[in-house]
Image: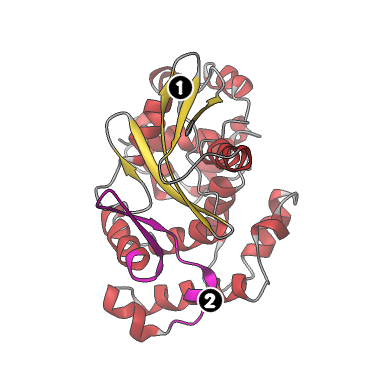
Amino acid sequence: MNTFLISTPSEFNFDRCLNFLKRSPREVLHRCDEKSVKKLLRFGSNEVLFQLCAADDNKLLVTILNQAASQSLQADIESFVRDWFDLDTDLKSFYALARKDDLLKDLVKKFYGYRIVGQPDLFESLVWAVLGQQINVQFAFTLKARFVESFGEKLIFENEHYYIFPKPETIALLTDDRLLPLQFSRQKSKYVVLIAEAFANGDISKEKLRGLSLQEAKEHLIKIKGVGNWTANYALMKTFHYPSAFPVEDVGIHNAIKNLKGMKNKPTLEQVKRIFKKYKGWEAYATLYLWKSLE
């Protein structure tokens, strides 16, 4: 059988997470329809294409599309999916806190089961954060699509193209003449290559940061030129699911608070920090639901 099931917590809603994955028609790292998502992964030398959809009894159904499903392959895919949808984080205490909070109580009721849809690849997470800076999100998706289609690995299955995010070793060798034609700014071009070099040289890796405190991990990341506080917090939130990670400077957080509180002006950085003191230990999920309020 090329199918198997993954158990999920009761505080998980696949459709809400799927809606997040469907937010841009320019996304090239997965393909969604109304009920499922398909994604290409690499495990060692093995390229695996699988489909994920909801099943009964708080389970997800995985269908491996391009090969037989060995036990070890099933375990690798399950590990990725649990990481991708943050399934191992117990949200009970977050929801208990949020239900008593004026800003969050209506949001957690409306979007119950929505989780941080992560980016398990730290390199991808950092590059995506850099690509999205100071431009609108749809153009950021366009840049990412051009980048992935130009330098990522590709599998054609049933006449559809599936991609894997480029390797740092590939990107570290690039120069402006390869990235500027994709409409990268010179600054984005420089920063993406510097991030790739840090990974290719072994200065940074997901394994090196695993197990560190949030502050320690952040200090490692901001040593890379082009990775500031916002980018580091975003990556640590999306790749490692640090519950206290949140990009306090994020304009979306400020706009969400302004809207929900009916303020005339956006809150100051100090006002945001004071508000988030209530969410200590759950800043990442407070951020997630505030972002969700903007849709």
Q: Residue at x 68, y 64 (%)?
A: 220
Question: What amino acid type should be assigned to the residue bearing mark 1?
Answer: Val
- Side of 202 where 50 appears, left or right: left
Residue designated by label 1 = 108
**Tag nearer the camera, 2 or 1:** 2
Q: Are marks 2 and 1 in contact (CB under 8 Å)?
A: no
Question: What amino acid type should be assigned to the residue bearing mark 2?
Answer: Leu
Q: Quadrant of the C terminus?
A: top left
Q: Earlier in the sequence, mark 2 or mark 1?
A: 1
Q: Position of residue 192 (x, y in %)?
A: 47, 72
- Side of 126 where 154 appears, left or right: left
Note whether 220 is above or below 170 in the view shown: above
Other-residue count near label 1 (Cα within 10 Å), few / some / many at <14 / 14–19 / ≥20:
many
Q: In front: 232, or 58?
A: 58
Note whether 219 is above or below 169 in the view shown: above
Q: Quadrant of residue 144?
A: bottom left
Residue designated by label 2 = 194
> Magenta span covers which residues?
149-174
> What is the distance, in whole Å, between disc 2 and disc 1 at their CAs?
39 Å
Q: Is residue 3 magenta?
A: no
Q: Position of residue 285 (x, y in %)?
A: 53, 34
